[in-house]
Image: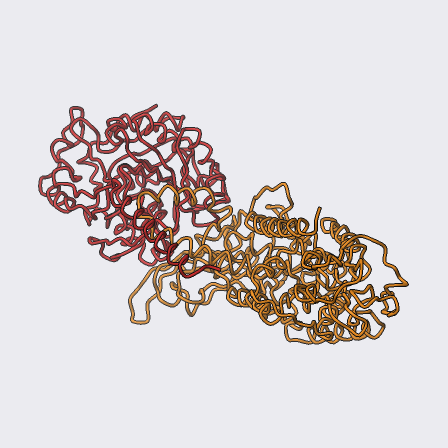
Chain colours: A orange, B red
């Protein structure tokens, strides 16, 4: 097969991979059945998988597929980035038409390695904050809490506007009856940080206009894993004969892996995403990307020993001068960053006391959550009520974008245990429905200064009616009182039975007050039983 | 890259397509809202109804009925097609059916009312609206309508030649897909040939309540107003605020913002009934949730009654259920009392023909 054919295959692979990613993301709903695991991309993500295993100090069986990804890296180098990464593919598609040759900044390229090393040491210290930079989690989070809700708003708006047109009714009815509650969210969901996630995604794409694939070159920690491996990978670009220095390869390389140095054209295998553009564009067919052992003598070693004599002034085998080599110094620096960062996290106020609204998904609080959560937002996507949301600073900067139950926006449905089933790392334990129903995620408190029967002397029993706990954690107290202007009224005033409340938050969600509910779910406090 | 010419060409093409689509849509037969003439509007037909051949009850006083009649002659809104079908001579005003088989008493009750063909005509679009209140409780807890009752109604409608029979409700907790499954209603309905509809956001629209005293405007599911026939089939349950949740309160399943109803629940429920008027109300009392409603996990809170109450009059059905199941006076239940005051229905049962059947 010719190189241009292979390039075609690569483009098709990108389309298929992006399509598969989004199909799986759309299929991530409660009770979904799929032949392909819905969290496939997280299983294939060595950065997320090994960070989670290191931080959680356990072997997570579902994520062991990442071992295959590591093996893949040693054979194919950064082919993941050029062929399979859905974010990389999207960056390829949305990119300036005029391609500037831009020299990859030597120092900037190191940023991704530094992030990776810091993430590694942070994981050793039980911290996974940097997983927010994993490209798969970025995509999934953006999809779950920015794209889907916005898409649904647009869809319902179009449907509502056009539904009066009779010929379109079967179409809209078909969409609603077939996909609502499965592929489409069961109800409109609302995310506190949707716009922020969308902006981050737009920024990552927008950086393409600074330098094509800037994210992949400088920042992506998953790219760093593969880049590291690519330096010794079996598949790599090679020059098979002399050339006339036309620099066509340099101009087309989307990651500027090819550069001119004193010793001629050089390629940095760590930056090569095996896109084959240089191979197809080379007018003299000088370049090949093929399998072969690394000629240590000709190529130098990973440590960067150069043997410039082997170069014939063309695309040489020698490592690019900016190739990254791991030194003791780098390790120490990374460790220092990680220790300092984690130490700062743990000296933040949230480390002393939980934020009052830090209501975690069921079972997560008891599960050393932040050392297991890879911030992938699978739980956010699967939550049918939209209650699970990427957090802001409720658990400090350390827990940025880890999931949080925001009851005012969606409750933990008594008939659902989907988040624990989908969580790829077990950060949210896979509780059975019976166990989940007993799991205390928070406790509701009534604000008697705002509650309608308490403060306004009018009937309302919504919280009691909604409470799904069999013995009712919200109970009504029948009272005859006088309003401040002297009218006698009979009222049913809600009260919370502390020991029964599981903090599901449907009371807070349904409270008819405008603004914050008069009954709110706070982090649970453990109290001994009342004696007497 | 799109050239300017190509852009213009496509724009014109799309515009033409849209215009064509709209034109087609305009030509398509749309349900034309025809206001019912006063004679066909629901009335209480004083003599005809009240002096049936076998009626053991007394006559209605002319004054009482005439006021009710005038109150009821106006058609609530132009979009409302389903309206209560009152009885004609020889048919009871309300039927109470008793028997061990939920399906059999459903059929018996409808037959006693004059048969399903009185309500459902050939080619009608029918909606059956049960109570499917949440996604976590099965039918055995008597918080959702008995699936066999719902299925039998679906069958009856199809036998009468309904074009389609849809079954829907908006659960207040959990999502519809799950609630339909959990309640057992999906399976029963689909086996009977009906279809479950997930109530879609696009079909809620603001509706005026010209006769509402407290509610002037609320979002209502449009298909409930547009369907030819709506059969409201709630389960009889106790309710902590409204006291009982029956046919009138069941209408909260077809509106948005239901939790805002609670602050003045009696008046607001009555107001809802001024516009949302099911053709027929069938109250499922096969197993009645006597206390701790509307949701109780305690099986001892529900009692097997093997009873069904059916009437076109939503107030009468509710009132009769209240006095049958809980042995209390309907006067004590605010929304029923207000409903009668507003002329939505009546419960002066001494003047109405109540038929008891067993099956």
**On the picture, is A20 further left or further right than A301?**
left
**On the picture, is A426 further left or further right than A57?**
left
Residue A362 % position (x, y): 60, 55
Looking at the image, which residue sits at the far left?
A: B62
Q: Which residue does the image show at 10% across and 42% down from the upper left?
A: B66
Examine the image and state in which quarter residue B307 appears.
top left
Residue A487 % position (x, y): 29, 66
The answer to whether residue A441 is seen in the rendering is: no
Q: In this view, does A456 lie above or below B101?
A: below
Q: In this view, does A41 lie above or below A255?
A: above
Question: In this orientation, which residue lies closer to the viewer: B45 or B151?
Answer: B151
Question: In this orientation, which residue lies closer to the viewer: B92 or A299?
Answer: A299
Residue B47 % position (x, y): 11, 33
Residue A444 % position (x, y): 52, 61
**On the picture, is A227 further left or further right than A381?**
right
Examine the image and state in which quarter residue A36 appears.
top right
Question: In this orientation, which residue lies closer to the viewer: A27 or B178?
Answer: A27
Q: In which quarter of the image is the C terminus of chain B?
A: top left
Examine the image and state in which quarter residue A232 appears.
bottom right
Question: For the image shown, how many numbered marks are present on the structure?
Answer: 0
Looking at the image, which residue sits at the far right?
A: A297
**On the picture, is B302 further left or further right than B43?**
right
The answer to whether residue A519 is seen in the rendering is: yes
């Amino acid at each position: 097969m010719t190189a241009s054919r292979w390039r075609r295959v690569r483009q098709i692979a990108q389309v298929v991979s992006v399509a598969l990613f989004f199909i799986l993301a759309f299929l991530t709903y409660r009770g979904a059945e799929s032949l392909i695991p819905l969290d496939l991309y997280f299983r294939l993500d060595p950065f997320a998988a090994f960070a989670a295993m290191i931080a959680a100090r356990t072997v997570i069986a579902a994520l062991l597929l990442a071992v295959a990804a590591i093996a893949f890296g040693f054979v194919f180098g950064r082919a993941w980035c050029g062929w399979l990464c859905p974010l990389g593919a999207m960056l390829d598609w949305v990119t300036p038409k005029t391609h500037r040759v831009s020299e990859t900044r030597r120092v900037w390229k190191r940023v991704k390695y530094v992030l990776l090393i810091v993430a590694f040491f942070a994981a050793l210290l039980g911290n996974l904050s940097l997983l927010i930079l994993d490209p798969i989690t970025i995509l999934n989070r953006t999809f779950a809490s920015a794209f889907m809700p916005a898409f649904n708003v647009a869809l319902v708006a179009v449907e509502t506007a056009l539904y009066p047109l009779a010929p379109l009714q079967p179409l809209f009815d078909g969409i609603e009856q077939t996909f609502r509650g499965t592929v489409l969210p069961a109800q409109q969901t609302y995310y506190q940080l949707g716009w922020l996630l969308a902006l981050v995604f737009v920024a990552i794409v927008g950086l393409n206009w600074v330098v094509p694939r800037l994210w992949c070159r400088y920042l992506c920690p998953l790219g760093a894993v593969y880049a590291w491996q690519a330096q010794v990978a079996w598949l790599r670009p090679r020059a098979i004969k002399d050339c006339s220095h036309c620099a066509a390869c340099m101009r087309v390389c989307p990651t500027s892996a090819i550069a001119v140095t004193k010793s001629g054209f050089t390629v940095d295998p760590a930056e090569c995403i095996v896109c084959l553009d240089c191979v197809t564009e080379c007018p003299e067919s000088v370049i090949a990307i093929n399998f072969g052992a690394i000629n240590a003598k000709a190529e130098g070693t990973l440590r960067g020993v150069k043997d410039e004599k082997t170069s014939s002034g063309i695309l040489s085998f020698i490592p690019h001068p900016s190739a990254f080599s791991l030194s003791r110094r780098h390790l120490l620096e990374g460790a220092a960053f990680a220790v300092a960062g984690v130490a700062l996290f743990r000296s933040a106020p949230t480390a002393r006391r939980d934020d009052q609204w830090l209501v975690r998904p069921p079972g997560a609080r008891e599960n050393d959550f932040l050392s297991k959560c890879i911030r992938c937002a699978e739980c956010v996507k699967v939550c049918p009520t939209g209650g699970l949301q990427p957090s802001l600073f409720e658990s400090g900067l350390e827990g940025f974008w880890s999931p949080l139950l925001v009851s005012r926006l969606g409750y933990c449905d008594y008939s659902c245990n989907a988040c624990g089933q989908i969580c790829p790392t077990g950060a949210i334990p896979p509780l059975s429905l019976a166990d989940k129903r007993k799991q205390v995620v928070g406790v509701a408190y009534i604000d008697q200064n705002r509650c309608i029967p308490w403060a306004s002397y009018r009937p309302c029993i919504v919280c009691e009616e909604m409470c799904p706990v069999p013995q009712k954690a919200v109970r009504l107290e029948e009272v005859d009182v006088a309003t401040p202007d002297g009218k006698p009224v009979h009222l049913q005033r809600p009260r919370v039975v502390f020991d029964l409340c599981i903090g599901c938050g449907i009371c807070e969600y349904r409270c008819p007050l405008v603004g914050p509910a008069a009954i709110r779910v706070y982090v649970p406090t453990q109290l001994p039983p009342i004696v007497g | 890259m799109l050239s300017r010419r190509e852009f213009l060409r496509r724009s014109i093409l799309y515009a033409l397509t849209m215009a064509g689509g709209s034109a087609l849509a305009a030509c398509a037969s749309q349900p034309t809202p025809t206001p019912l003439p006063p004679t066909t509007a629901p009335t209480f037909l004083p003599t005809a109804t009240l002096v049936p051949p076998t009626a053991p009850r007394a006559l209605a006083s002319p004054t009482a009925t005439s006021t009710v009649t005038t109150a009821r002659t106006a058609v609530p809104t132009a979009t409302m097609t389903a309206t209560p079908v009152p009885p004609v001579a020889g048919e009871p005003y309300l039927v109470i059916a008793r028997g061990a088989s939920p399906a059999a008493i459903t059929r018996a009750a409808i037959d006693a009312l004059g048969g399903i063909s009185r309500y459902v005509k050939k080619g009608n679009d029918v909606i059956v609206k049960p109570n499917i209140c949440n996604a976590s409780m099965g039918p055995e807890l008597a918080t959702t309508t008995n699936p066999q009752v719902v299925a039998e109604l679906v069958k009856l409608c199809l036998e009468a030649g309904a074009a389609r029979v849809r079954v829907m409700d908006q659960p207040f907790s959990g999502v519809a897909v799950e609630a339909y499954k959990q309640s057992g209603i999906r399976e029963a309905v689909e086996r009977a040939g009906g279809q479950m509809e997930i109530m879609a956001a696009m079909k809620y629209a603001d509706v005026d309540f010209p006769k509402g005293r407290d509610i002037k405007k609320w979002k209502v599911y449009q298909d409930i107003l547009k369907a030819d026939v709506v059969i409201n089939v709630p389960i009889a349950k106790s309710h902590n605020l409204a006291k009982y949740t029956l046919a009138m309160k069941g209408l909260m399943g077809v509106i948005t913002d239901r939790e805002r109803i609670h602050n003045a629940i009696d008046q607001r429920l009555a107001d809802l009934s001024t516009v949302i008027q099911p053709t027929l109300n069938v109250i499922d009392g096969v197993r009645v949730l006597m206390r701790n409603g509307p949701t109780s996990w305690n099986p001892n809170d529900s009692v097997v009654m093997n009873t069904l109450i059916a009437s076109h009059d939503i107030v009468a059905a509710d009132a009769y259920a209240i006095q049958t199941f809980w042995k209390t006076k309907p006067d004590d239940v605010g929304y029923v009392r207000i409903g009668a005051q507003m002329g939505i229905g009546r419960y002066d049962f001494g003047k109405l023909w109540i038929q008891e059947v067993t099956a």
